[in-house]
Image: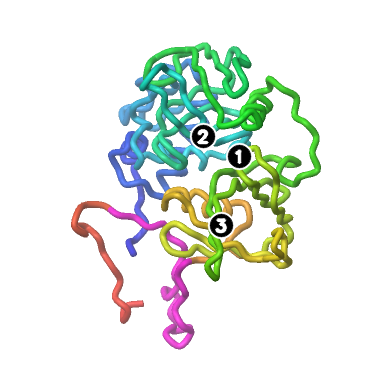
Amino acid sequence: LRRPVSLSSEQAYSALTGRFCATRTSKQHATIVMSAILSNPTASSGSLSPKSKGSMSSAPTLHNPAELADPSSPLGAKMQDVVDDLLAEGFLRKIRGFGRNRNRWFRLTNTYFAFYTEDAGSLIAYVPRAAIADVCDVSTTRFSISTTVPFGASGQSHMVLEARSAAVKARWLQALGKLPVLSDTHVSLTGPKYIEGFLTKLQMFGAMSRTRWFVLTDQGLSYSTTDGGQVLGECAMENIHSILPKGEASFIFKAHEAFTRTGASTLYCQCSSPEVRDKWIETLERVLGDARVKSEFAPLPQAAREVTDRFAVLTKQEWEYSGTNSEGNRFIADNAL
């Protein structure tokens, strides 16, 4: 454990460019900067240098910002930390020609449209949602997007995207306002979204584990056969009991009452990476609060505490690592707690 770090404006700026260890303080600063960037898309590119002393009057160029592509940058890997309404996210295939097509993770909110190397991966490029000039239905699974500013590493303002199925394409066209949103009785479609993506349901006693598409809205959690597939289970928000992180890339979802087709009230969810797990846990914690999202670490036993010692209190602190081979890390000994 390390003591909390107080960031200067220069260090906070460095965090945006990925040259400083990302901390909770720098993320809060980054959120403010992100809001300023998105609210002023025509600003110049040099306004957020350390010499500007924290001025938010202008912002960097929005298309393909290299300084946001580093995974350690709060904006590069954690644009979901910015408070904004999620409209859609998921894998789409960028069609660029033979041997050049790429699967990317796209994310559309009320404010911006972005794509990443993978789910919870590094940011490649983003534009304000207002910069989307046109959306065209190309084929059964393809559609195109035209923007008023260059979008992507290639510097083009036109992009052809391919969905995995016609249902997935329809979901994106609805989110982009090209198709009307159809009314549906499923929980997953009746409220604003917080997060969605693939998770693997781990089964016990030798049963086959299956990857499902999960969606968390303000109404609850639901999961389907796949993205755009049949809904298999729904858990209303008030039915959620607790969330417990498990290992590096999984967590346990518990409900008060059974909500799956097999009559289970507990799901063991495996994520594709620790980063995806952290994305889900952070979102669930923001939505449900600390009371229902349990910590991986148990508190000190009461017998080990001095009730008169005002400093024997551990507050929540984000893990932080700097240097190589454990250089620069500091730990508190058991007898010092």
Residue 24 visible to the viewer: no
Residue 298 visible to the viewer: yes
Amino acid type, mark 2? Phe
If you read the primary sequence from the N terminus, does the residue marked by circle 2 or circle 1 appear first? 2
Q: Are marks 2 and 1 in contact (CB under 8 Å)?
A: yes
Residue 227 has which mark?
Answer: 1
Q: Nearer the viewer, residue 8 or 277?
A: 277
State how far apart marks 1 and 3 are (Cα). 15 Å
The residue indicated by pointer 3 is: 201
SS assignment at label 3:
strand
If you read the primary sequence from the N terminus, does the residue marked by circle 1 or circle 3 appear first? 3
SS assignment at label 2:
strand
Mark 2, Cα crowd under 10 Å, few <14 / some 14-19 / many 20+, is: many
Q: In x, y percent, where is residue 217?
A: 67, 46
Q: Is residue 135 above or below residue 56?
A: above
Q: Quadrant of the N terminus?
A: bottom left
Q: Are marks 1 and 3 in contact (CB under 8 Å)?
A: no
If you read the primary sequence from the N terminus, does the residue marked by circle 3 or circle 2 appear first? 2
Q: Quadrant of residue 44?
A: top left
Q: Which residues are magenta?
A: 296-321
User: Overall secondary structure of the magenta stretch?
Assistant: loop
Residue at 39% across, 18% down = 98
Q: In x, y percent, where is residue 311?
A: 41, 73
Q: Quadrant of the C terminus?
A: bottom left
Amino acid type, mark 1? Asp
Q: In x, y percent, where is residue 152?
A: 42, 21
The stretch drawn in magenta includes residue 271: no
